[in-house]
Amino acid sequence: MYLLEFLKEAARTTDAPAKRITVEHRLVCSGELYNARVQTGSGWRKSDATRVLARSPFELFVVSRPFDAYPQELCLRLMLDYATEQCMQENMSFRNIFLPDDEIVEDLCSLLSLLARRLIVPAALVREQYKEENPALGSFGTDFPQPLLSIHYTAWKQRPHMIITRGPDGQEIVSYHPPPLRVYPDILQDLLLRLPSLPESDRIIRAARLYREALEVIETRPDSAYQLLISVAETLSNTTPPAYEPTEQEMLENKRPLYEMALKFGLCADQARQLALEAGRGNPWTKRRFKAFLSKSVQPEELSVKDRVFHPLEALCPPPDKFSKALSNIYDLRSGNLHEGKPLPRSVRIGIGPMIAARDLPLNPLAPPEIPPVVWFERVVSLAVRRFILNYTSAPTSPFGDPALPSPETAAD
C-alpha cells in the first residue's frame, strides 16, 4: 500500500533525500474541521492559523471561504517520487512507472474519514510542482496546472436548521448538522507515523476504505452501507490475535454430529474427539468474532447519549439488554441479504437526517424492529474501530475531538 510506504519513509528519518515532485489535491469534508492547538480569543473562524490542520508528513489546510462553508474544502500537499511496479514472466519483464498520489490520497481520505467520523473524499488534483525545469514549457514546466472543470465528489446533503417556538419564552434554533470538529495536528502526525510499523496496518487501511465507502452511500443506499459496515467490523475482528477464540469444548459442540458419526463408524472416543477438533479448526467463527469485536469495545449504555452526527429515533434502537441480540440479528440478516437478496426493513434509513418518511416507520411503533437503523450501527462500528486503532497504535488520545474518545482536554483533567 503506497500510503503505508509513504508514512514509513516519513517516519524513518528527517535526513531523507528531498522528493522531486510536490502534488496538491483538493479534498471535500462533510463537516467543519479546525486546528484546536491555536488559541483564539474571538473564535477559530477568525484566525487563518486555525486553517492549518497538518504540517507533517503532509500539509493539510482549510481553503473554504467563509471558514464554515459547506462542504468544507481542504488543500492537501505532499511530496513524493515516482513508483515502479515490475513483474517477470519467463524472459519478459513488465514495468509500470507512475506517480502514486491518487492511491495515497484515496487511502488517506479513507483513514481520515474513519478517525474523524466525517466523510472526507478527494475532489481533484490541482497542481504538480517539479524541481527540474523544462524550458519549452516556461514557468509551467516547474508548476504544472491541472484541469478543474471536471471536478466530481460525493458529500452528505446539507441538513437544515429547525426553529422551535416555546411559547412566550422565545424560540430555539436546533441544528441537525454535525458539529465542528477539533483537530490536533501533533497527535494526528504521531498516530500516522506509528501506523506503518504495526503488523496489521494494511488491515486497518482496508477497513478504512470500507468505512469511507459506507459513509458515501449511507444516505442513498442504506442496505449497502449496512453490508459495508459489517465488513469493517469483520475485517478488524480477524486481527492477530482475533477478537474471539473458541474453546475446545465449543469446537466439539460445533462438530457434535461428526463426533457421533465417527463413534458409529467404530472409532474410539478419543479418535472421534480428535477428528471433530481437527474439523472444527476450519471454522472461521466469523459471527462470534464479529460480536466479540463490537461488544468488547462498546458499552451499550453509552449509546443512550445523544449522537453528534446522526439522529436515530430512540424507539427504533435496541435497549442495552438487547444489544447482543441486535448484533446477532444484524449478522444473520446480513447473510440473507448478501446470499439471497433479502431486503432490509425500510426503517434502517431513519435517522440519517431530521426528516422521516411515514413509509419508513414500522407498522407497530411500540415494538422496535429486529434490525436497528443503519446510523445506530454506524455509531457502534465507528466507536469500536476508533478505539481499536487508538489501542493498537498505543495512542493516548484521539487526534480528533470527540466526547466518546479520550482527548487532550480530558487527558489533562
Image: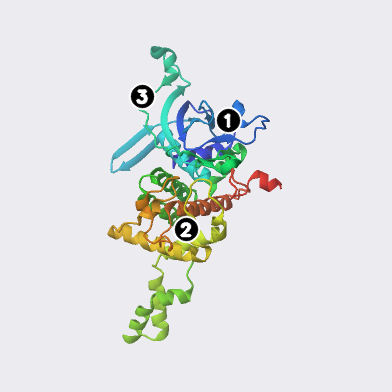
**Could you tell me if the residues under marks 3 and 1 are in contact, i.e. CB atoms within 8 Å?**
no
Packing grade of label 1 (10 A; few <14, some 14-19, many >=20) is many
Question: Where is mark 1, residue-wise?
Answer: 52
Can residue 264 be seen from the camera position used here?
A: yes
Packing grade of label 2 (10 A; few <14, some 14-19, many >=20) is few
Q: Nearer the viewer, residue 50 or 20?
A: 50
Q: Nearer the viewer, residue 3 or 332?
A: 332
* Distance (Cα) linking label 2 and label 1: 41 Å
* Distance (Cα) linking label 2 and label 3: 46 Å
Q: Residue at x 29, y 43 (%)?
A: 89
Residue 64 to residue 397: above or below: above
Furthest residue to the front?
168
User: Which amino acid, mark 2?
Assistant: Ala
Is 106 on the left-hand or right-hand side of 32? left
Furthest residue to the right?
413
From the top left corner, tell me how far across and down residue 106 is, in percent: 43, 38
| Quadrant showing the N terminus | top left
Of the numbered discs 2 and 1, the one sitting upstream in the chain is 1
Residue 266: quadrant of the picture: bottom left
Q: How is the image coloured?
A: rainbow
User: Which amino acid, mark 3?
Assistant: Leu
Question: Where is mark 3, residue-wise?
Answer: 149
From the top left corner, tell me how far across and down residue 227 is, in percent: 38, 53
User: Which amino acid, mark 1?
Assistant: Val
Q: Nearer the viewer, mark 2 or mark 1?
A: 2
Q: Residue at x 45, y 58 (%)?
A: 316
Of the numbered discs 3 and 1, the one sitting upstream in the chain is 1
Can residue 100 be seen from the camera position used here?
A: no
Q: Nearer the viewer, residue 272 or 364?
A: 364
Packing grade of label 3 (10 A; few <14, some 14-19, many >=20) is few
Q: Residue at x 54, y 42 (%)?
A: 165
